[in-house]
Amino acid sequence: MSRALMFQGTGSDVGKSLIVAGLCRAFVNRGLRVRPFKPQNMSNNAAVTADGGEIGRAQALQARAARVEPSVHMNPVLLKPQSDVGAQVVVQGNVFGTAKAAAYQSWKPDLLPRVLDSFHRLREEADLVLVEGAGSASETNLRKNDIANMGFAQAAKLPVMLIGDIDRGGVIASLVGTKHVIDPADAALIRGFVVNRFRGDPALFSSGMEEIARLTGWAPVGLIPFFEEARRLPAEDALALTQKYVPRSVGGRIKIAVPILPHISNFDDLDPLEAEPDVELVRVWPGAALPGDAALVLLLGSKTTISDLNALKAAGFDIDIAAHLRRGGYVLGLCGGYQMLGRTIADPSGIEGAPGTVEGLGLLDVATTLIAQKTLTAAEGRTADGTSFKGYEMHMGRTEGPDCARPFAQLADGRADGAVSSNGQVFGTYVHGLFADDRQRSAWLRRLGSAASSLDYEAGVENTLDALARHLEAHLGLDGLLSHAA
């Protein structure tokens, strides 16, 4: 029988995903068969799995850390927000339905058996399953029918490690407070606590660790120093976009501007560009203007394309993009961004809201119809300039029109993808992950006036995972963690 250990947090973005990823790599380096698992995730950053479904991108990264292919069973429930109160619900890789937050609570009892099924499938093929909770363990208002944190831990009879983030302040109160607000039976599952993202001399917080242990009765498992290289790994969800953004490369030769829209998805498409020393990637929120000296405006994917298109226009980004093109700049739309570039977007079935048709930006002579069937597949082929690529498709839409006669790419399965404008300045494609392919990224940098890139992006991700594993092994007792697993 394999062992399992769950990691929950005092709040969102305390480092659960990265800690599980690093531990996946650390334990697999010890020769264990490791599988990551997250019962319920909420994120519009998703990945396509080999078994034809989708999961949160954080679990795909954790699978990579464990050196296994991602599976739909690693994240059996994925919530993809479509509004402030509703989300698309993906169960074991496939769309299950759409629900508002209140209605979704009533679905959970029926989803728990599916979650447990996926968990037990992973246990059968692993020596160790590392389970990640969602949000905060102390959200007692959501405890009834919970499948993400203590509800799952109780159902699966799992020991729990609780993670607090000292970088945001109040870590003693958040850890001790969790003990006092959750049910005593849930608190009894917590074996120890971890304090993450510490800066400075660890000796200065030794008394803090002792005080938390005294007030909770939980074992102090580790004090983890801030891991700066975490920025090189994909962020789990859009919370990372709302935090103060500091460009990795300021004053780079090539400036790429990215409008940040409310329902942006798969924004990890930006990560390889941010890693380029010659690129200054500028994220632009509504209320600011797109920089006039940008070489490329990049429109990312969207969970609700029509809503984000309206937000783009309301922010005046359409005017900025038109001026950018008059100056001779390039525009690239990925997935939902591609759909926005066309003449119209039709939603006859009301997939994103009320049925109807809206005008697009009119920069490509194509029209999109949203359809219920979702395309989820790996993609590879060659772009029109002959450059090879590998990526993936994840979309609910069919795009057709005269500019499709100049496809962005020819796929290996014989299909043509995307479109290019007659003046060669506007490009649209349904392929995600283009820039993670060194060949494709280098071709774009050359098009924008830079030298070919020497960056090996995928090797950089691997090196960062190895460094994260070493970092955690130095500050967490791996043997001690294993002793708590059950």
Image (cartoon, rainbow, N blue to C red):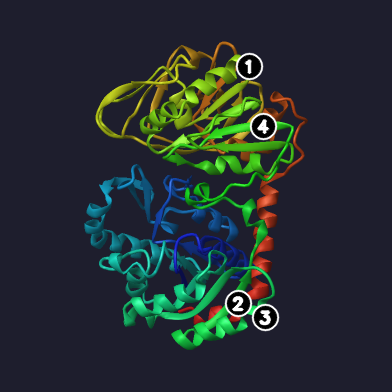
- In this view, the mark in front (4 or 2): 4
Q: Residue 431 carries which label?
A: none
**Label 3 to label 1, Cα distance in Å?**
57 Å
Which amino acid, by three-letter code, is at mark 4?
Lys
**Label 3 to label 2, Cα distance in Å?**
21 Å
Q: Tag 2 or tag 3, which sits nearer the N-term?
A: 3
Q: Residues within 10 Å of mark 4 (few under 14, many from 20)?
A: many
- In this view, the mark in front (2 or 1): 1
For the point 34% across and 67% down, the residue is 139
Q: Residues within 10 Å of mark 3 (few under 14, many from 20)?
A: few
**Label 1 to label 4, Cα distance in Å?**
14 Å
Which amino acid, by three-letter code, is at mark 1?
Arg
Classify residue 377 as left or right of residue 383: left
Q: Residue 203 carries which label?
A: 3
Q: Residue 327 carries which label?
A: 1
The residue labelled by disc 4 is 255
Tag 4 secondary structure: strand
Which quadrant: the N terminus?
Answer: bottom left
